[in-house]
Amino acid sequence: MQLSDFNYELPPNLIAQHPLANRTDSRLLELVVKGDNRAQIVDRQFKDLLQLIQPGDLLVFNDTKVIPARLHGKKETGGLIEMLIERISGECQAWVQIRASKVPKMGSIVHIHNQAGETFPVEMLAYDGRFYEVCFPENVFALLERFGELPLPPYIEHRPDSEDAQRYQTVVAKNPGAVAAPTAGLHFDKDILQKIHALGVQQATVTLHVGAGTFTPVREEDLSKHTMHHEWFSIPEATLQAVQETHRNGGRVIAVGTTSLRALESQAISQKSSGETNLFITPGFQFKTVDCLLTNFHLPKSTLLMLVSAFAGVDNIRAAYQHAINQKYRFFSYGDAMFLCLLENTKQ
């Protein structure tokens, strides 16, 4: 398939700029794909998820925590520079995206600053064709806490504030390392998690540190030429056991977000429970672990739109997105959700 197959026109006013008052206030578009590949679309509220999941099902969340990954500073020449962590590669090293009038030369020093007037030097080490490797003078996480800014996605137009600091994290977040939130998880609060548990639906976690590459546009019209970005993941043994038991007992494994899905499917392919993945899921991919997917609406021509199209069918996703636009759903990180399920994987 071609990149143009995954394009759509979105009115700018449908891009959610702020979260709703409560996490569970979002709408939920249910997309059920029947055996003959015909799709049924149902407009719901997110709280209706309690009616769509069943005892014996397993919800798998991504427990990554968003770090303050955006840094501001100056080059030695005095020019302004912005760094966005792509992924942390060592205690004092990271791969970053850089925005500047002219990128500093390898071996040069960039001076990062904060609003308190403090500074620290960053050395430019290498360039891999997409991202720059840099060296920090001490622990990356410690410096980010003092100097970093919450990295809201580029389509959110305001600077991060106290509301974002709280709402651009999931309630299950505990392992720092992501530079973008696993947004499907943003719809859950502690109350609905308790109700899910009371239903007899199990919950488990994986960790996949979402990288800034998730926002990098696909530039190749021929998708076979696209190089997928790497992200680090880890799956606890307890989660792997829960997946096996769920399937053995006839339940469904429901991935909360594309990141949880990519971690689970990466493990199924590699048989490794941790490491880096650059799994690029496009139509034709054979899913081995995940039966249903809870996800947000994704950007045109994005790898995530390709992933959901692989899961539910290109034409079905295209129809669902057009329906969502017509019904004025809210899109992207702070937007509404979708519940995708194949009928043969349900007990209905």
Image (cartoon, grey):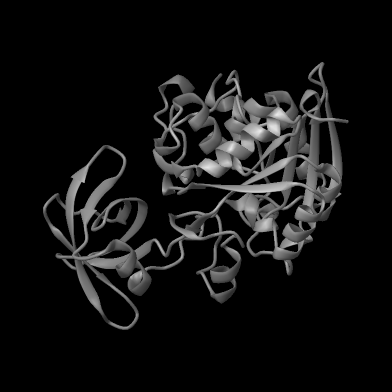
Answer above or below: position of 83 versus 287: below
Q: Residue furthest bottom?
A: 116
Answer above or below: position of 289 versus 142: above
- Work out whether residue 27 or residue 8 is closer to the camera in this orientation and state it: 27
Name which residue lies at 63% across and 26% down. 310
Left or right: where 206 falls relative to 18 = left
- Work out whether residue 301 or residue 280 is closer to the camera in this orientation and state it: 280
Q: Is residue 222 visible?
A: no
Residue 293 placement (x, y as % from top left)? 68, 38
Name which residue lies at 15% across and 51% down. 105
Residue 67 placement (x, y as % from top left)? 43, 62
- Work out whether residue 321 or residue 90 is closer to the camera in this orientation and state it: 90
Image quadrant in which you'd find residue 169: bottom right
Left or right: where 265 falls relative to 234 = right
Image quadrant in which you'd find residue 170: bottom right
Name which residue lies at 55% across and 62% down. 157
Residue 90 placement (x, y as % from top left)? 26, 52
Q: Quadrant of the C terminus?
A: top right
Answer above or below: position of 12 versus 174: above
Q: Is residue 265 visible?
A: yes
Residue 119 placement (x, y as % from top left)? 23, 75
Q: How many marks?
A: 0
Image quadrant in which you'd find residue 278: top left
Q: Quadrant of the N terminus?
A: top right
Name which residue lies at 11% across and 53% down. 107
